[in-house]
Amino acid sequence: MHDPIRNIKESLLSDLNERMSTECTCTLKETATRPVPGDGSACATILLIGEAPGKNEDLQGVPFVGAAGKFLDEMLASIGLDRKDIYITNIVKYRPPDNRDPLPQEIEDCAEWLHEQIGIIDPLLIVTLGRHAMNHFFPDKKITEAHGNAYRREFPAGRSQVFYTLYHPAAALYNGGMRDTLKQDFLRIPKVLEKLRSGA
Ligand code: URA
């Protein structure tokens, strides 16, 4: 069906991806194979933000396609969603060498693209995966205390956004306790959305 808003958002995202690959100043570009901008629906209600592309993502140019991505797909299915219903991206758009943690400067250099993505998609809820994504928006929070909670953050120009903070699927993959906690936290996403939709 013809949806003018979707067409506009898709075209803005595709323009953004083009500019990201030519204009991004992040030095990770020098060692990465390609940018990994994001994947999913430009009209998504939920925007998921991970940490950084890994080896498989770097090869394919798509986020969360490895083992952590498979686990994420299972959790999406547990709440009746799949990739085409959401949008998924990372705080840094290029793979760090040897999958090391992204450095503060790299996060800062990629931030303009992330914030543009948020502006275009304008999701009802942002779900952060892991401490790096969470600390980008909430520098003082600890993931062990914050996981499974929703927080509102004000942005300039009177904009505000609700975030739901989760453990990272890669960290939880081989840690039984964290894995169960993440799955439980994930199952609460529909309730958080329901509350937001009802204006609570
Ligand atoms: N981990 C992330 O944080 N992002 C990916 O794209 C893949 C694994």
Image (cartoon, rainbow, N blue to C red):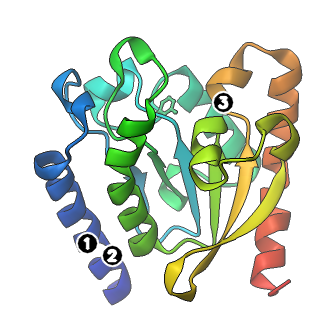
**Residue 3 in sight from this viewpoint:** no
Ligand 1 closer than 8 Å to the CB at disc 3? yes
Q: Which amino acid is tagged 1?
A: Leu
Task: Residue 181: give x, y in percent of width and height.
Answer: 87, 33
Mark found first going from the N terminus, 3 or 2 = 2
Drawn side of residue 51 relative to residue 160, left or right: left
Quarter placement of the C terminus? bottom right
Q: Which amino acid is tagged 2?
A: Lys
Residue at 49% x, 23% y is: 101
Question: Which of the pair 93/184 is nearer the observer?
Answer: 93
> Residue 12: which disc?
1
Secondary structure found at label 1:
helix
Question: Which of the pair 187/148 is nearer the observer?
Answer: 148
Query: Would you identify the image quadrant in which residue 196 lies?
Result: bottom right
Residue at far left of view: 22
Quarter placement of the N terminus? bottom left
Q: Which amino acid is tagged 3?
A: Pro
Mark found first going from the N terminus, 1 or 3 = 1
Ligand 1 closer than 8 Å to the CB at disc 1? no
Q: Residues within 10 Å of mark 1 (few under 14, many from 20)?
A: some
Residue that carries the numbered disc 3 in the rendered image: 169
Residue 18, above or below 57:
below
**Residue 124 in sight from this viewpoint:** yes
Label 1 close to label 3 by CB (< 8 Å): no
Question: What is the distance, in whole Å, between disc 3 and disc 2 at their CAs?
Answer: 28 Å
